[in-house]
Amino acid sequence: MKRFVTLFLALVLFLSASCPVHAKKKNSTSNPSLDVSAPSVLLMEAETGTILYQKKEHTPRPPASVTKVMTLCLIFDAIEKNQIALTDEVTVSEYAASMGGSQVFLEAGEVQTVETLIKCISVASANDACVACKLRNKEPVIRG
């Protein structure tokens, strides 16, 4: 699951919803190429390191949502260490609910599963979900 989410996040970050992707066939025997409107892209298969698609991959670009990707890494590490589970429930704090920017409009006192918060962070880049699911002193803020 961690590999899938990593690949999914790479796609989300580099091929965001506002960047249309159209598959075109070079010819009937070759793999399809992508026409991506993003300024630069690097898509790599995580396990083998095989580059699946690249476009101006060496052009310096500012990072996008690195904090959210790192939050997801901490969540998945905690899951691997059996500190939390996808089914654990998280009570949203007032502080988490007050986050601005990209959000899914969680309400203070609302209860969501870790799995739902992962989806909110991955799909909506939700600041409120990141803060709700944060870890304090390596102990998860989990109820349940």
Image (cartoon, rainbow, N blue to C red):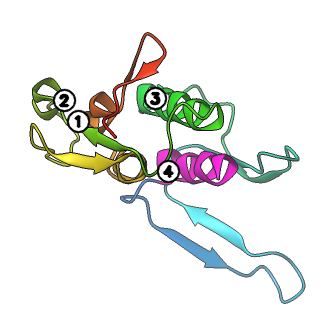
Of the two numbered discs 1 and 3 on the same chain, state the one appearing first in sequence.
3
Quarter of the image where one finds residue 110: top left
Type of amino acid under label 3: Thr
**Residue 135 forms part of the magenta stretch:** no
Real-space Cα distance between discs 1 and 3?
12 Å
Task: Give the x, y percent position of residue 90.
Answer: 30, 39
Front residue of 78/130: it is 78
Look at 87% across and 78% down and name the residue there. 30
Element carrying mark 4:
loop
* Magenta segment: 1-15
- Mark on residue 38? 4
2 w.r.t. 128: above or below: below
Element carrying mark 2:
helix
Element carrying mark 1:
helix
Quarter of the image where one finds residue 19: bottom left
The mark closer to the camera, 4 or 3, is: 3
Of the two numbered discs 4 and 3 on the same chain, state the one appearing first in sequence.
4
Of the two numbered discs 1 and 4 on the same chain, state the one appearing first in sequence.
4
Q: Which residue extends farthest top? A: 137
The mark closer to the camera, 2 or 4, is: 2
Report which residue position mark 1 lands on: 128
Look at 10% across and 43% down and name the residue there. 107
Pointers 1 and 4 in contact (C-beta within 8 Å): no
Q: Residues within 10 Å of mark 1 (few under 14, many from 20)?
A: many
Q: Residues within 10 Å of mark 3 (few under 14, many from 20)?
A: some
Task: Give the quadrant of the C terminus.
Answer: top left
Of the two numbered discs 3 and 2 on the same chain, state the one appearing first in sequence.
3
Type of amino acid under label 2: Ala
Look at 66% across and 41% down and name the residue there. 56
